């Protein structure tokens, strides 16, 4: 049986606590909204996999992480998408670094029907009405957060509570990639 998974970047606990409090503040202002109870994260991709397939995918993720180098991330703005998503945005340098990490997984993972994200952002809310987006922008006007992205997290969707939970963490190991050496014939 296939289960739903997502590969994400989890900021450290202090940022997750801040994001949770921001979600609560927004809920006090606009009422319940999509992703109100979701733990803060930056989505890389979502996919479905069987128990057998997920073991192979975990090996692929681990191999990719072996060569990745940690990146400093600076979140310093807010943004929204036309679908009603409201989020914390990275600065331009961090956006470039995060896109590089995300692209690495999205290009290399051998997964059918994978939903890829190519716009790094830390969601506060999804599917807000235009009126509630305005309220979110009025409620949150300044932010300045820093963290080191040095791992990715694999999460599985729990059908009972309708939320993802962490199954595995994959640290970046900063190992140099082996160079391809062309042999010479004598």
Image (cartoon, rainbow, N blue to C red):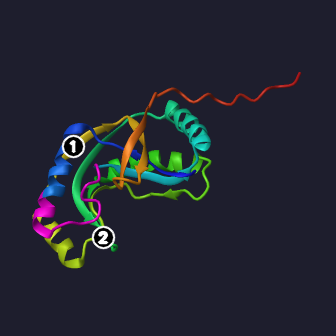
Q: Does the magenta stretch include residue 165?
A: no
Could you tell me how far apart the alpha carbons at marks 2 and 1 are, in whole angstroms? Answer: 23 Å
In this picture, is 172 found above or below 94? above
Specify the quadrant of the image occupied by residue 53: top right
Q: Is mark 1 on a helix, strand or loop?
A: helix
Q: Residue 167: which quarter of the image?
A: top left
In this picture, is 163 found above or below 166?
Answer: below
* Dominant secondary structure of the residues highlighted in magenta in the image: loop
Circle 1 residue: 15
Along the line of sight, which residue is nearer the eye, 182 or 139?
Answer: 139
Q: In this view, does 39 lie to the left or right of 6?
A: left
Residue 75 image position (x, y, % from top left) = 25, 50
Q: How crowded is mark 1: few (under 14 residues within 10 Å), some or many (20 or more)?
A: some
**Residue 155 pos. (x, y %):** 42, 45
Residue sitting farthest toward the top: 186
The magenta-colored residue range is: 25-39
The residue tagged with tag 2: helix, strand or loop? loop
Q: Which residue is drawn at 37% across and 54% down?
A: 120
Give the quadrant of residue 166: top left
Return the residue at label 2. Answer: 127
Q: How crowded is mark 2: few (under 14 residues within 10 Å), some or many (20 or more)?
A: some
Left or right, 115 with respect to 84, comes to right
Q: How many marks?
A: 2
Q: Is residue 102 left or right of residue 148?
A: right
Q: Name the one closer to the observer, 24 or 158.
A: 158
N-term mark: 2 or 1: 1
Examine the rendering and report whether any part of residue 29 can be seen.
Answer: yes
Residue 64: numbered disc = none
Location of residue 103 in the rendering, given as x and y in whole percent from the top left corner:
50, 50
């Amino acid at each position: 049986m296939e289960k739903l998974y997502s590969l994400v970047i989890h900021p450290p606990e202090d940022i997750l606590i801040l994001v949770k409090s921001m979600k609560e503040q927004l809920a006090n202002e606009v009422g319940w909204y999509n992703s109100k109870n979701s733990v803060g994260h930056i989505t890389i991709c979502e996919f479905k996999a069987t128990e057998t397939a997920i073991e192979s995918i975990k090996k692929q993720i681990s191999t990719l992480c072996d060569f990745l180098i940690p990146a400093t991330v600076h979140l310093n703005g807010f943004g929204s998408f036309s679908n009603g998503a409201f989020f914390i945005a990275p600065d331009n340098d961090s956006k470039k670094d995060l896109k590089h990490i995300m692209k690495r997984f999205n290009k290399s993972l051998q997964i059918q029907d994978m939903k890829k994200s190519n716009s790094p952002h830390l969601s506060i809310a999804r599917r807000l009405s235009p009126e509630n987006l305005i309220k979110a922008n009025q409620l949150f006007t300044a932010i300045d957060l820093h963290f080191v992205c040095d791992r990715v997290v694999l999460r599985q969707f729990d059908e009972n509570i309708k939320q993802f939970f962490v199954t595995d963490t994959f640290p970046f190991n900063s190992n140099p990639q082996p160079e391809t050496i062309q042999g010479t014939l004598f």
